[in-house]
Amino acid sequence: MKKSSSSSRARSDDLNGPEGGFKPAWWCRGPHSQTLWAPLFRRGPRIRVKRERLELPDGDFIDLDWSVGDGAPVIIILHGLEGSSRSPYVRGMFAALQQQGMRPMVMHFRGCSGEPNRLARGYHSGDTNDLAFVVRTLREREPHTPLAAVGYSLGGNVLLKWLGESGNSAGLYAAAAVSVPFVLQNSSKRLDRGFSRLYRRCLLSCLRRSLQRKFRGTTPPFRADAAAAARTFHEFDNAVTAPLHGFQNAEHYYAASSSRPYLRRITVPTLIVHAADDPFLSRELIPSTDDVSPQVSLEIPAHGGHVGFIGGSWPGQPRFWLEERIPVFLMHQLTFRRSA
């Protein structure tokens, strides 16, 4: 597959160039407006799902929320930090993929489906084992069904890292990743600056609430006082993420889990969409075409925020560009692979 032409994507060293087809709404142009509009105002489409509990090799479980129906290409959706099938962006993509005749499935990370997972460990940005197990399971069940994946933010980092690790054995027809924190250490620091501290505060509050529910009445395998006192992601990851998942400290976790070093190894046709004004990552660390494999198409709009990309003429008639762009990309790749 050839990379997309310069008219449909922009390099990160020319971020004021072509916008990959996305034009932000005049009423929702800034990075924070783009990031916050949907979480605050979008109710999202209603979706019908059937839940499957998948037992994992280590004795834990994850929950999969499937589209009702069978026989169509399966698209795995990987949510972001503390997301789920209830998240508006997940429901929007789920419905859009269904409308295009595909069979979406939301893979919840451990503890994100509404019920705490069994083991003390949880999920993190670099843990690709559960995704690998899900793909193997689906391949065994339906060896001839086309399979693709879409990942958002943390889920996008997991997806890209796994694609790079897996190489030719990935078993996917196509993939798409949105608003990925390619360099976790930088993303942690970026969330300590300016208005982005609001996102940090909200996400850390969600993480602390999840820990409280999970370890209520028990002694957690980390310093609960340090977790409660953490005001930055670096402090939280030092106190919780690293000890729970076998890392020496936050720096070790960030270095081992960032997806950027894996981008050149991807062999699956993959679309990466990332806004130049994403408030979760410094602009200079957005990948360029020199940082990715020939199978990766970069689209770097100048605007879009973090998992935003809101267009439309009026606030009452928003257009969710990701839900138009990504199904088109996946359908193109699925059709091409089937006819090859």
Image (spheres, rainbow, N blue to C red):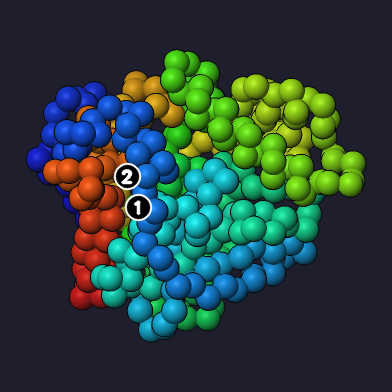
Q: Nearer the viewer, residue 252 or 184?
A: 184
Residue 155: where, in percent of width, then height? 49, 48
Q: How many marks?
A: 2
Residue at image point 82% right, 46% down: 215
Three-letter amino acid code at disc 2? Ile
Counting residues from the start of the chain, the first of labels 2 and 1 encountered is 1
Q: Residue at x 34, y 23 (%)?
A: 283
Whether residue 165 is visible here, answered yes or no, is: no
Q: Position of residue 163 (x, y in %)?
A: 45, 52
* Quadrant holding the N terminus: bottom left
Crowdedness near tag 2: few (<14), some (14–19) or many (≥20) residues, C-alpha within 10 Å: many
Q: Are marks 2 and 1 in contact (CB under 8 Å)?
A: yes
Relative depth, front residue between 293 and 281: 281
Report the residue marked by disc 1: 176
Residue sticking out furthest to the left: 7
* Rendering quarter of residue 59: bottom right
Mark 2 and mark 1: Cα distance apart in space = 6 Å
Query: 189 and 320: which one is in front?
Result: 320
From the image, tell me which residue sits under label 2: 272
